[in-house]
Image (cartoon, rainbow, N blue to C red):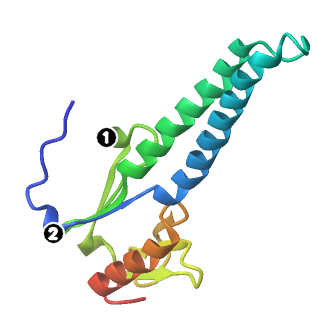
Amino acid sequence: MMNPAVQSPEKELRFTRSGQAVVFWVLAAVCAAAAVTCAATAIYRDTNPQLPHPAWALVPLGISLLTARLAVDMTRHAYLILTPLGIEIFPWFRPSAGMRLVIWQEVHAVEVNASTTVLTLHHNPAKTSGIHLSLLPIRHDRRGLLARAVTGRVGGA
C-alpha cells in the first residue's frame, strides 16, 4: 500500500537510519569483494585443485545483495519525522503498523545527553514518564540538528 504524498514536505524534518546503514554498506562491500575473489580464483583450479569451486562465490554475493538492500532501506526510510503536529517515531519492523505519534502538547520537557546519543521526551513536570529514543541510528552530524530542532520547539530541558 502506497502512502499518500506529503502535503507540505517543507514543514517536516526527516531523520533516517543512515548512521546504522554505514555498517551494512561496509559489510556489503566486503562480501562483494569476497565473491569476486572466490570467482576469480577459478582460473587457477587446474594448477591447484584444492581451491573452492567458483559456485561458492554465490554465498558471499547473496549476503552482499541482502546487506546492500538493508542499507538502502535504512538510508531511505524515516526513523523520526518532526512535523508541525509532533514527532513521528518509526520502528524498524512493520513501521506502518508500529508508528507512534507524540504530539507537541504531550511533551513537557526534552533532554539530550552530552554525547547526543539519547533523546528523552518527558510527559510531565516531575519527569517520571516519557520516552527515551536512541539517536545512534541517525548520522552523527545530524544528531545535533535534531536536538536543536526538538529543544527549540519544546523550549529546552
Residues packed near mark 2 inside 10 Å, few (<14), some (14 to 19) or many (20 plus): few
Residue drawn where x is 42% and y is 43% of the image: 73
The three-letter amino acid code for the residue at tag 2 is Lys
Asked if the residue at tag 2 contacts the one at tag 1, i.e. Cβ–Cβ closer than 8 Å, the answer is: no
Pick whichever, 68 or 49, lies toward us: 49
In-image side of 48 versus 133 (left or right): right
Q: Quadrant of the N terminus?
A: top left
Asked if residue 81 is positioned above or below residue 64 in the image, the reply reads below
Q: Where's residue 20, x and y in %?
A: 54, 55
Q: Where's residue 31, x and y in %?
A: 66, 35
Residue 122's quadrant in the figure?
bottom left
In-image side of 78 versus 66 (left or right): left
Pick whichever, 144 or 94, lies toward us: 144
Residue 124 visible, this orientation: no
- Using the image, tell me which numbered label, if any, was put on residue 11: 2
Residue drawn where x is 62% and y is 34% of the image: 32
Q: How many marks?
A: 2
- Using the image, tell me which numbered label, if any, was put on residue 52: none
The three-letter amino acid code for the residue at tag 1 is Ser
Query: Which label's residue is closer to the chain start, 1 or 2?
Result: 2
As helix, strand or loop, the secondary structure at mark 1 comes to: helix
Pick whichever, 44 or 66, lies toward us: 44
Asked if residue 46 is positioned above or below residue 111 in the image, the reply reads above
Residue 123 visible, this orientation: yes
In-image side of 43 versus 13 (left or right): right
Alpha carbon distance from label 1 to label 2: 21 Å
As helix, strand or loop, the secondary structure at mark 2 comes to: helix
Q: Quadrant of the C terminus?
A: bottom left
Residue drawn where x is 18% and y is 40% of the image: 3
Residue drawn where x is 77% and y is 12% of the image: 53
For disc 1, the marked residue is 96
Residue lying farthest left? 7
